[in-house]
Image (cartoon, rainbow, N blue to C red):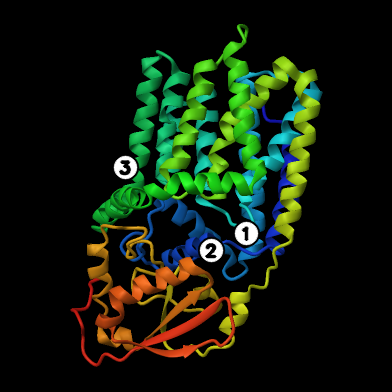
Amino acid sequence: MSKIKLPLFALILSASLIISALFFTNRLDQDFFSYYYTGRGITYGQDYFRDFAENKGPINGYVIALLYLFFGNHFRLGLFLTSGIVDAVSVLLIYQIIKHFYPLSSSKTRFTFLLITLPLYKSFSLGSFMSSFYSESIALFFFFLSMYLLLKKRPLFSGLIFSLSIMSRQNIVFYLPLFILLQKRDYSKHLRYFAGLVFGTIAIILPFIVKNTLSWLYQNMVIFALKYHNSVKNEIVNSLFSVIQVEFRIFFVIFFCLVALIMLIVNKKAKYKLFTTISLIVSFYIILSGGIVYFHHFHFFILPFCLLLAFTLSYYQMLVAPFLLLISLSLGLNYYLNILSFDSPSLLHRQLNNISISRQYVTVVPYYPEIYFYLDKQAPDRYYQHFFILPFFNKSNQKDVLLHQQLSADKLQQTDFIFVINNAFDQQMVNDYLNLFQSSFCLKQAQKTIFGPPQIIVFQSQCQTNVLPESSF
């Protein structure tokens, strides 16, 4: 594997930062504000799992906490720099990994590969219609670094870094067979790799053991993830096809991977057929295992796509390179023009100016965590978002419903319950929440915006005594 050249990295970094400048103009995804809310809480000394109903890995929380620590409310600047740098390093690592399989010997081939890969990677990293620095970007950064280290014959450190990847987004663990394949039958490497993986995992969960919150980690990362997948399993296929229909860029990636894989299999001179096939199958499984499919989940297709892109450029360059460049750049241009068309000032933000929020806490239903930052408020308990407590996402929600009901009368009196209705799905979520908690929280409507969507309705508690004992959060 060749050494990393500084001018090449400078070029990739410059391009990545230019694209990441979209964070200054584009509307930010709710996922970012959800991450930032928990990251802010970590900097205040809160526990990632006990104090937040969050199912992403703790490394994701720690990375976002660092982002909040350095940038605070200047989060667009933080997103610009963090996304620009992390994505640039990830693309450079991909380039080095691919060169282990395919030499990309000519400058024309290398240029074509990077010209297609970088904008595509950035589009997956940014997301569609709204932008964020997703947990996929963090997990894949550590994944590519881990694979790079393994190819550099550093199995111990490779396993250590892969534990960071798993503890960023847990379903990336399904990439483990790729590391086993790369080490072939070198059992000493296998031993060192798994020693690093086990040591890294123990080191990450050790603080939760010390704080006696390991059970919260297990409940959030494992149990809820399984319950969520089971609750929405009937929606997964529909959401997959919806995404493919809306984003031709994603359809192109899937179509190209399938066609190129067939070309790889039938090519008698080609190598790495098993590795590439498994990488594609596992990537697809990771996307489906995450529950409802969203645009940014296709970030996981980048490894098989790059492997198959390098294969086609190595064996069929004159035939496919002009076509791939043309369609990739066209799709990329269309994506970036579309993402620029979404206004940064949110209608939701403007609607919030039409209501008065004076209480210490707010609970927001459904998933609009940006409200916590617009109002500079916190939730009264760990359920700052509704995924754990509403039956659509968690049909086995009894334990979480009981925990949420343990709010004291004092906290209820200090909480504004903000319901946002932008569409029929939001209305369903609001109705489900009120069915579960309106009676026990003694909720009465206090305010309502006249115009919409989105329509904002504020409820307040009329309870005078504790409904249930105070929780021990």
Q: 132 left or right of 318?
A: left
Q: Is residue 286 above or below residue 62?
A: above
Location of mark 3 (residue): 202
Residue at the left extreme?
A: 469
Label 2 SS: helix
Q: 295 left or right of 44?
A: right
Q: Amino acid at mark 2?
A: Gln
The reply to whether the C-beta atoms of the residues labelled 3 and 1 are less than 8 Å apart is no
Label 1 SS: loop
Q: Position of residue 291 (x, y in %)?
A: 42, 48
Density class for disc 1 (Cα within 10 Å; few <14, some 14-19, many ≥20) is some
Location of mark 1 (residue): 130
Q: CA distance from mark 3 to mark 1?
A: 36 Å
Q: Amino acid at mark 3?
A: Ile
Q: CA distance from mark 1 to mark 2?
A: 8 Å
Q: Amino acid at mark 1?
A: Met
